[in-house]
Each structure stands twice: as structure tokens, then as C-alpha cells.
Image (cartoon, helix red, strand yellow):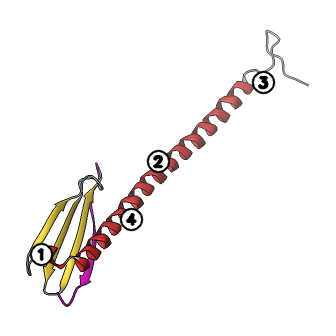
Amino acid sequence: MQMQLQNGKSSQQGVVIIEAMIAILIFSIGVLGIVGMQASMVKNTSESKFRADASFIAQQQIGFLWTSPDSMPADGSSITSNISNVLPAGTLTISRSGVEYTVTVNWRQPGEEQHNFTALASINGV
């Protein structure tokens, strides 16, 4: 037995549109969540690439120091190079203390704090 209103329409009228609007709302929240996760994944992927690039640059410089002893900084000094073409706002610093060499790679992504990667090497017999 259905309840009829005065003009003959059912009291259930309009429920379908409310259900559809709720379904669209739930779907929209899900899509926004997926978009947010993808943005986070892109950010993490770029950070990972920068860390890998910094590690590669530091290891490459240590290998260069082993093969080219004349390019080494004097004891107690350091050499700084701009590597912004590889890393955003990137710098490479090589410092020497006796036979210990410290290679530091710094970079800064826009809107982020500065990151650095440091590698230490002992090069004897120079």
C-alpha cells in the first residue's frame, strides 16, 4: 500500500536523484584520492632520481680523483663546482684532509629544503 500525496504523487519521488548525487560524491572522492596518490608518487620518484644522480656524481668524482691525482685539492682546502645542469640548484664540493676526501653533493628542489649526499674516500699513495 503506497502512500499518496494530495496531488497523487508518491512520497518516494526524488529519492533516485539523491542516491545518484551521493554516488557521484563517493566516486568524486575516490578520484581525488587517486589523483593525490599519483601526485605523491611523482614527487617521490623525482626525489629518488635526484638521490641516485647525486650518488652517481659523487662516486664518479671519487673515481676521477683516483685516476687524476693532479686534480686533487691541496690538503685542508676544497673545490666547489656548480652542477645545476644535472641537479636543481646543485653544487659539488670536494674537500681534503690528509688522505681523506669528502665529496658532498647538494641540491634543492623548488619549494623544498636542501638535500645533500656525502661520500668519503681514502686515497693513499698520491
Q: Mark 1 points at which residue?
A: 73
Q: What residue type is labelled 3?
A: Gln
Point out the residue furthest to the top here. Answer: 7
Residue 12, labelled with which disc?
A: 3
At x 78% / y 22%, what residue is drawn?
A: 11
Residue 39, labelled with which disc?
A: 2
Q: Where is residue 80 in the image (x, y as percent from the top left)?
A: 15, 65
Residue 30, picture quadrant: top right
Which range of residues does the magenta coloring cover? 110-126
22 lies above or below 51: above
Point out the residue furthest to the right here. Answer: 1
- Residue 53 part of the magenta segment: no
Contact between marks 1 and 4 (CB within 8 A): the answer is: no
At x 47% / y 47%, what residue is drawn?
A: 39
Q: Is mark 1 on a helix, strand or loop?
A: loop
Point out the residue furthest to the bottom here. Answer: 125
Q: What residue type is labelled 1?
A: Pro
At x 38% / y 65%, what residue is drawn?
A: 52
Q: Position of residue 76 (x, y in %)?
A: 8, 80
